[in-house]
Amino acid sequence: MIKIFIDPGHGGSDLGAVGNGLREKDVTLNISKRIRKYVNDHFEGHSIRMSRSDDQTVSLSQRTTLANNWGADVFVSVHVNAGGGTGYEDFIHRSLSNTSSTAKLRDIIHAEIVKQVDWRNRGKKKANFAVLRTSKMSAMLTENGFIDTKADADKLKSSAFLNRIAKGHGEGIAKAFNLKRKSSGSNADSSNPSGSTSNSGSNENSTIKWLGTDQKGRRVESIYRGSDGLNYYDSPRWSNPSGIFNYGQGWIIDNKYVVDGYPMYRVQNSRKQLFWITASSKYVRVI
Ligand SMILES: [Zn+2]
């Protein structure tokens, strides 16, 4: 289960930027709800939480604490720019290299958003924003147009355009985590711009997507207390386990993947053999 944390910027007593009859806190909440709906309508194998779902004041540290405590896999903070420019840009923390797993995740989401919005692409940027610095998972912050530029604000007043912003975020997140696209249903999107990733979930059709990790070389150990132990596998799969870990047993992280929509670590034992285990924070911890 991929855990997606959406953070609508500002809220309550913090209006964010204002201009052209818009308040940033309202636009960010509007976009965030549309992202949640888009992903829930089109994909499965994930769970979404938001730092707020109405007009309430939430501090910056509360936002990342919520995401950290939940064990989110990704944190996406949604904002609207101000200061007299135009277009779209996004940020990751300034300490991250361009080859970090967060940068790669941002590359994917950025590409999907700029596909949807006919805005000037202001680029992929880095900054020392608090929500990027204090979140433990991959985190990015999107700046969706300029509220004080009339042409941008006019688009932010259009429900159809907000849907495109949301679709870009949603498709990007789904692509980054290889979420399974819902194969049927009235909400299915026939345009399917990034190609169908649906599969039956059987072994022959299993999907393996490289995620990468900043945790290579660290120890991951089982925090599962069940007497049946925590399964590990000698290939990326979720059936026919090769053995079990008891509580507290662990190996060294080599890499991270999404297998059939769920995160897995590839780990190395003391004899340099590679195995696969869940990367869910419900079952394992990295120390
Ligand atoms: Zn903002």
Image: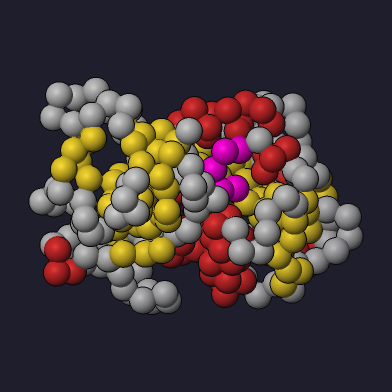
Please name whichever residue, 50 or 23, is drawn nearer the observer in this view of the structure.
50
Q: Position of residue 255 (x, y in %)?
A: 42, 55
Vertical position of residue 193 compared to residue 18: above or below? below
Q: Quadrant of residue 258?
A: bottom left
Residue 85 shown left or right of residue 72 in the figure: right
- To which quarter of the image does residue 159 belong? bottom right
**Which residue, as the protein is rendered here, is positioned at the far right?**
84
Q: Does the rendering let one see residue 59?
A: yes
- In this view, 238 is above or below 53: below
- Quadrant for the N terminus in the image: top left
Q: Nearer the viewer, residue 98 or 82?
A: 98
**Residue 285 percent across, percent down from the top left:** 41, 33
Q: Report the residue at 74% width, 27% height from top.
A: 13
The secondary structure that dominates the magenta segment is loop
Q: 287 or 16, which lies in front?
A: 287
- Please identify the quarter of the rendering in which residue 231 is found: top left
Residue 68 x %, y %: 53, 32
Image side of residue 196 versus residue 231, left or right: right
Q: Residue furthest front?
A: 271
- For the point 44% across and 59% down, the residue is 211
Residue 160 against residue 64 in the figure, above or below: below
Name the residue rendered at 68%, 59% in the picture. Answer: 97
Q: Determine whether, in the image, residue 142 is placed left or right of residue 22.
A: left
**Does residue 175 sit above or below 32 in this rendering?**
below
| Residue 116: % across, % down | 56, 71
Residue closest to the eye, 97 or 107:
97
Q: Which residue does the image show at 22% across and 45% down from the upper left?
A: 232
Residue 138 inside the magenta-drawn segment: yes
Residue most extreme to the left: 240
- Indicate how the structure is coloured in the image: secondary structure
User: Magenta stretch: residue 198 in it?
Assistant: no
- Provide the residue span drawn in magenta: 135-139
